[in-house]
Image: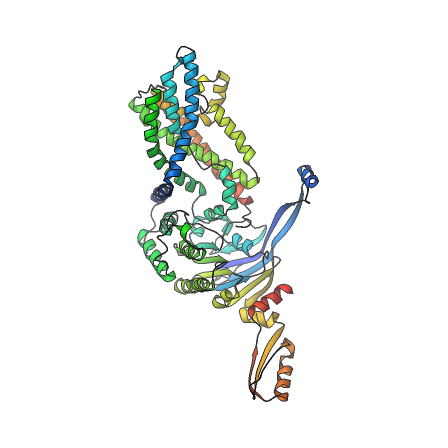
């Protein structure tokens, strides 16, 4: 049984895609007409985790790890091959209206806005789709527009917005119904650093203001470091890690960086194996006149790279 | 906390908003809409010219139908055709490929409502643009058209009935795209059937009795022939009302098939890449 407090409960989640396969060339093409070959691709293989109310969790993994497939199952787009999932007490793939009114899935490459019209028209359509009382809708819309500072964008046809601008109005459109659970799949993909930061701050503000639970995938570690205390890491569809972000470095960081400033102003920097940090530091102090010393975990990007490599 | 509006009010609100949104979209492309409307007229004008020529060669009638009645049939045909344009099954492949279906599935609304609301909205600008074309066609081809009030009322209901039936049928066909990657060939067979026994290519009264018998058991005639004949055919009142009942029947069948096909097909949706 899932813990009573869990907003998202995932246990042994599996998704297997059956895909046709053939060699290149005309002969193989003809053969596939009468003897088609299939291959089972295990995209998600026994993933389990729980999310507590108001948690912001990073869902990390390399391309093809199964992150998006997992998010699609959690949001009800895909039926799993096996396992158990409840989100806000609902089984997602039953796609009950009450469930869909309480969640959102934002994908960096997806566009739900009317291309030829100003975003305000799409927002109005969302009001009708989500059956939002007009006053509540107007208040929320104006609040979100202000929060993301897009007053001057929502009156332009969407087709005339840049990628970053479109992403911002897309995010607002996805949150008008004030979802309690946000599945964010690469929400900052392709955006410049300023725009990434704006989206990050917005997600943090939304989480704080509405107590929403957020599951976020991103290849930008700055997103993860800014928003997530906890991360879940998957690779080849399988869970590698579920815990605090800093614990990830403890477990997978193969080295630490020791930087020492000597009395004569010279700086020494060296990477040492994690289990040799103490002895290396002691040796450095014994052999040099050190005026300042720092010992740091490797950058999170390096840790993640190490995780995937392992 | 504001109270939730009733389900019926919510649907009315959604359909009104969806239609408004689409009308606004259409107005973004006025020239394209006008060219499309002109293109829509080409097909019936060709049929009309062919049948008038045949009528003139046979003493002014075809199977007892005069040239003026033929003109009325095809001018009203254009209006009916405009009304029963719906989201085609061919669009489903693009909808899936571009990720639009994923967006729709995330909404607390069955996708069929979205299609029906938006395509209902499309019709309003088309109707406005069609009006002068209809006047021009009438001046050129002199249709014989003198409907009774009940025929006008039934016609107005029937063209919407035709739209609903065709929308539901095409949604069911669209579901095949989720089961097989290229469902286009199946759609072609369906459209061939529609072309032949709906009254689209030829008024059903011009067809042999066996073809008319087949048409009676299929939904096609209720989306073309019946609405047209309701206005131009001088049908008795009971036939008009029976026709509406048949439209209700096919609407019911369509609803059940939409529900069942969506339930089955959506399990096969892979949402790969979007």
Foreground of the two, A157 or A86: A157
Is the N terminus of chain B in the top left, top right, bottom left or bottom right quadrant?
bottom left
Query: Is B137 displayed left or right of A191 in the figure?
Result: left
Check the image and report above or below for B68 versus A51: above
- Report which quarter residue A302 is drawn in: bottom right
Foreground of the two, B5 or B122: B122
Query: Is A145 displayed left or right of B274 in the figure?
Result: left
Q: Position of residue B252 (x, y in %)?
A: 44, 33
Residue B242: in sight, yes or no?
no
Check the image and report above or below for B146 versus A142: above
Q: Position of residue A70 (x, y in %)?
A: 55, 55
| Residue reaching furthest to the top | B59
Q: Position of residue A297 (x, y in %)?
A: 57, 74
- Report which quarter residue A47 is drawn in: bottom right
Check the image and report above or below for A214 versus B245: below
| Residue reaching furthest to the left | B149
Query: Is A189 displayed left or right of A133 in the figure?
Result: right
Q: Position of residue A122 (x, y in %)?
A: 38, 49
Foreground of the two, B141 or A119: B141
Task: Say which residue appears at 48% left-offset and 51% top-offset.
Answer: A110
């Amino acid at each position: 049984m899932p813990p009573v407090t869990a907003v998202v409960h995932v246990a042994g989640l599996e998704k297997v895609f059956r895909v046709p396969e053939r060699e290149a060339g005309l002969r193989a093409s003809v053969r596939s007409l009468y003897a088609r070959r299939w291959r089972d691709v295990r995209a998600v293989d026994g993933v389990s985790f729980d999310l507590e109310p108001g948690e912001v969790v990073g869902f990390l993994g390399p391309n093809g790890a199964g992150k998006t497939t997992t998010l699609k199952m959690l949001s009800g787009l895909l039926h799993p091959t096996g396992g158990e999932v409840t989100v806000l007490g609902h089984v997602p793939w039953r796609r009950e209206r009450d469930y869909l009114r309480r969640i959102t899935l934002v994908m960096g490459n997806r566009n739900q806005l009317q291309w030829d019209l100003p975003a305000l028209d799409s927002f109005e359509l969302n009001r009708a789709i989500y059956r939002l009382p007009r006053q509540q809708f107007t208040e929320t819309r104006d609040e979100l527009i202000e929060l993301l500072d897009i007053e001057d964008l929502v009156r332009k046809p969407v087709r005339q917005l840049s990628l970053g601008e479109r992403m911002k109005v897309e995010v607002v459109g996805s949150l008008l119904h004030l979802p309690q659970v946000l599945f964010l799949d690469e929400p900052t993909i392709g955006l410049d650093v300023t725009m990434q930061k704006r989206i990050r701050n917005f997600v943090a503000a939304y989480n704080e203001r509405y107590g929403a639970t957020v599951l976020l995938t991103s290849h930008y570690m700055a997103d993860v470091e800014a928003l997530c205390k906890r991360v879940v890491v998957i690779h080849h569809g399988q869970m590698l890690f579920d815990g605090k972000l800093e614990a990830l470095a403890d477990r997978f960081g193969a080295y630490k960086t020791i930087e020492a400033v000597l009395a004569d102003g010279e700086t020494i920097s060296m990477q040492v194996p994690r289990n040799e940090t103490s002895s290396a530091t002691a040796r450095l102090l014994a052999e040099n006149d050190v005026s300042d010393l720092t010992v740091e975990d490797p950058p999170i990007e390096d840790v993640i790279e190490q995780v995937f490599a392992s | 906390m504001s109270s939730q509006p009733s389900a019926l009010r919510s649907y009315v609100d959604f359909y009104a908003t969806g239609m408004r949104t689409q009308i606004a979209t259409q107005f973004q492309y006025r020239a394209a809409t006008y060219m499309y409307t002109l293109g829509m007229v080409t097909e019936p004008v060709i049929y009309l010219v062919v049948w008038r020529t045949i009528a003139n060669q046979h003493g002014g009638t075809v199977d007892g139908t005069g040239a003026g009645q033929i003109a009325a049939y095809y001018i009203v045909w254009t209006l009916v055709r405009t009304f029963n344009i719906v989201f085609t099954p061919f669009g489903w492949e693009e909808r899936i490929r571009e990720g639009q279906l994923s967006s729709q599935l995330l909404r607390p609304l069955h996708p069929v409502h979205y299609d029906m609301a938006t395509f209902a909205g499309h019709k309003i600008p088309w109707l406005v643009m069609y009006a002068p074309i209809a006047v021009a066609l009438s001046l050129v081809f002199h249709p014989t058209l003198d409907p009774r009030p009940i025929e006008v009322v039934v016609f107005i209901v029937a063209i919407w009935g035709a739209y609903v039936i065709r929308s539901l049928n095409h949604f069911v066909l669209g579901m095949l795209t989720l089961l097989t990657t290229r469902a286009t060939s199946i759609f072609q067979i369906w459209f061939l059937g529609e072309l032949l026994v709906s009254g689209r290519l030829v008024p059903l009264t011009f067809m042999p009795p066996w073809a008319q018998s087949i048409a009676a058991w299929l939904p096609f005639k209720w989306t073309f022939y019946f609405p047209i004949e309701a206005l131009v055919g001088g049908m008795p009142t009971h036939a008009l009302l029976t026709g509406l009942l048949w439209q209700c029947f096919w609407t019911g069948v369509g609803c059940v098939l939409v529900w069942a096909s969506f339930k089955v097909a959506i399990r096969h949706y892979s949402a790969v890449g979007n």
